Image: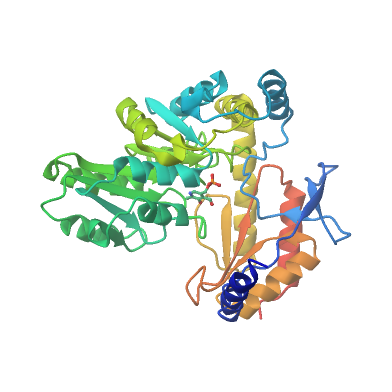
Amino acid sequence: MALDRLDESLSRELQQLQEEGRSKKPERIISGYLPASGSSGPRYLLEGQTRPFLRMNSNSYLSLSLHPALVEAADRATRHFGVGPGAVRFIDGTFSHHIALESRIAGFVGQPAAKIFNSAYTSNCGLALALSGATTHWIGDQLNHNSIIRAMRIAGVPSQNKGIYRHNDMADLQRCLDEVGPEIERVVVIFDGIFSMRGDYAPIEQIVERCNNYHPKFKDGVITVVDDSHGLGAYGPTGRGTAEYCGVSPDIIIGTFGKAFGVNGGFIAASATVIETVRQKADTYIYTNPLSVADCAAATTALDICAGEEGALILRHLQERTEQFRQGLAALGRESIPGPHPIVPLLVRDTAATLDLVNRLFEAGILAVGLTFPVVPRGDETIRFQVNAAHSASDIDSVLHALRNFRQP
Ligand SMILES: Cc1ncc(COP(=O)(O)O)c(C=O)c1O
């Protein structure tokens, strides 16, 4: 067997991951969906379990993935053009649905142009590939998403061309800007809009102000980039994300269609020239098939909904349920990180207690995520709840009720 010795080596590596507490548990499998009924929102069935579950761990903040208009749009596009594009974008894999989505998302985030990718992950990699060079210096928040960190490595950014500032610490950002060498021509400051483990947000107005002060110092200036994967659709008065919440837009916006918009795929939105550079230089755009027309049609419809009256109502419901949950946690005396985002962390600050509480919630039919070391620093062990627009007031009450019954050890 050709893989015998490789399998043996890999088994040792897997064993080591397990011993270090870094291995991932087997994945649960969703095997059924029960639509909302009466005062209850939707429930999910899991393979091997008999009871239905309330999902408090979904990124689908606006709960659009089963919206009839999205399903119908995906269905219509598929019947017309088929399930797959047949080639990469440059080899006649570009369909009118790709162009329509690029135009709609650029308009939604208030940028002149956009390019869509298979995911926000590959969008970050694409941007790093497009903008990096020997005289480019990258600066990022310490808690940036893995896709940004990995993007730097894929783009081959050397360590002397990178700076990391302490989470949301503006003085430390300034230190990173001060440390940029005189040979550098282009500085890119990149940060998550909403930090997915905490539900807090980047103070974009302060970041942009700091960067503007340094802009004249470098040939191409200091460019600000937000990855607002968790913010777009779910944050800000009209769901335009963290930039809207902060009242200032960075130069480049990255996002996903796979969270609040309920579909899949990612994008970069910026000036027409940046976007053309991305089209020419981003390997994760060039050498891979694009999204299906079904994804594009569904995402375009999601944006139409978000821009209209129905979207405003859905967003308001999400905001109200989030507030209900946050207030309920506070009334129970539970520690959280304040803010209006539907990612609501419950800080337990102990590994065993976190895992115990997650298990007890599971037994009560509630899915939530326990975050323990090394995902979060020791002492910051957390249960991450995510509210979504399909939750009813009674769903939120039922989670609070369960938490009330499980006294904190
Ligand atoms: C900030 C950030 N960027 C990118 C991603 C990945 O998004 P996608 O699933 O579209 O690749 C995530 C998802 O967790 C995220 O939180």
Q: Quadrant of the N terminus?
A: bottom right
The residue nearer to you, when weighing 383 against 116, is 116
74 w.r.t. 125: above or below: above
Tell me which corner region of the image, top left, top right, bottom left or bottom right, holds residue 222.
top left
x, y percentage for residue 125? 42, 46
x, y percentage for residue 342? 58, 50
Relative horizontal placement of residue 161, taking residue 362 as reference (left or right): left
Residue 245 visible, this angle = no
Q: Residue at x 62, y 75 (%)?
A: 8
42 w.r.t. 311: above or below: below
Tell me which corner region of the image, top left, top right, bottom left or bottom right, holds residue 61.
top right
Q: What scheme was used to colour the molecule?
A: rainbow
Relative horizontal placement of residue 114, taking residue 26 as reference (left or right): left
Relative horizontal placement of residue 330, taking residue 150 as reference (left or right): right
Q: Residue at x 24, y 60 (%)?
A: 171
Q: Quadrant of the C terminus?
A: bottom right
The residue nearer to you, when weighing 170 against 26, is 26
Residue 383 visible, this angle = yes
255 w.r.t. 365: above or below: above
Q: Residue furthest front?
A: 1
The residue nearer to you, when weighing 29 against 222, is 29
Tell me which corner region of the image, top left, top right, bottom left or bottom right, holds residue 398.
bottom right
x, y percentage for residue 139? 29, 54
144 w.r.t. 348: above or below: above
